[in-house]
Amino acid sequence: MKQSKNILNYLIIIGLIPIIILIGVTVFSDRSYLFIATAVAILAIISVFLTFEKNETNTRRLVVLAVLIAISVVGRFIFVVLPGFKPVTAIVVISAIFFGSEAGFLVGSLSALISNIYFGQGPWTPFQMFAWGMLGFIAGFPYLSAKLKSSKVLLSLYGIFAGVAYSLMMDVWTVMAMDSTFNVTRYIAVVSLSFPFMIVYAVSNVIFLLITIKPIGEKLARIKKKYNV
């Protein structure tokens, strides 16, 4: 039963959600981006619910995830004057390390959706949701999350990877936003122009991960042990 739920979650997150986003940008030409963003959020929530067992810890788990999303959103607000220098990825990765891939995707996707109420919703929102969500989803893989929790070197490397991956994924939207098609030559040009931002993303991820992993991680570990979430 658990294995079938895991397979379904994988199909939702790495299969259904990307398809919905691509349909939004190609078929609807980004005109229905709020509908697409809402659909992504609902599917992310469903994937987390599929991991729940029938007990009272589910509510506690949701509360913890809601708090992590709030911290991520507030962190993005606080550093608004520093473009690209944000703690969002760090909070998403830490959420995934302690609560799994589905939780990481949920925190990442909802952080983008909610914070964009202030920063501005647009056709880029579903791509941001998917980009931050996938960084959490990958970080939550059991073997990788255990290594990230115990090794600051590996955690730093993942921060660099996350910065590069986020920039590359958002550059896909930049290219497709021009005429709803993907052009390799144009993509390479966009990536070369966005390279300075990629460096900022990577550096900020490493800094925030190293600063926050111990204080937030210790609190999450105590909560998991005390409330069995």
Image (tube, helix red, strand yellow):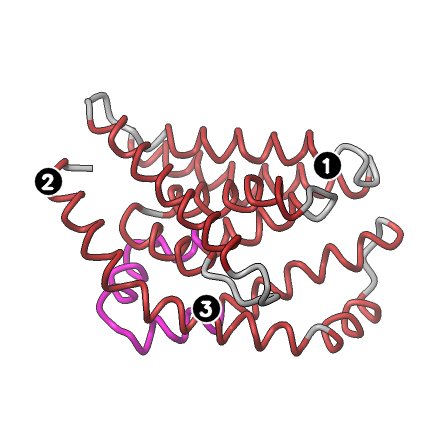
Residue 33 is marked as: 1
Q: Which secondary structure type mostly characterizes the magenta part of the structure?
A: helix
x, y percentage for residue 221? 18, 51
**Location of residue 149 by image quarter:** bottom left
**Location of residue 32 by image quarter:** top right
> Residue, x 40% and y 67% (percent of image)?
208
Q: Residues within 10 Å of mark 3 (few under 14, many from 20)?
A: many
Question: Is residue 87 or residue 7 the one in the foreground?
Answer: 87
Q: Earlier in the sequence, mark 1 or mark 3?
A: 1
Q: Are marks 1 and 3 in contact (CB under 8 Å)?
A: no
Query: Is disc 1 placed on a helix, strand or loop?
Result: helix
Residue 226 is marked as: 2
Q: Is residue 128 left or right of residue 124?
A: left
Q: Is residue 157 left or right of residue 84?
A: left
Mark 2 residue type: Lys
Mark 3 residue type: Asn
x, y percentage for residue 192? 74, 78
In space, the residues marked 1 and 3 are separated at their CA atoms by 27 Å
x, y percentage for residue 40? 58, 35
Residue receiving disc 3: 205
x, y percentage for residue 214? 23, 64
In space, the residues marked 2 and 1 are separated at their CA atoms by 41 Å
> Residue, x 77% and y 43% (percent of image)?
25
Mark 1 residue type: Tyr
Magenta extent: 136-161
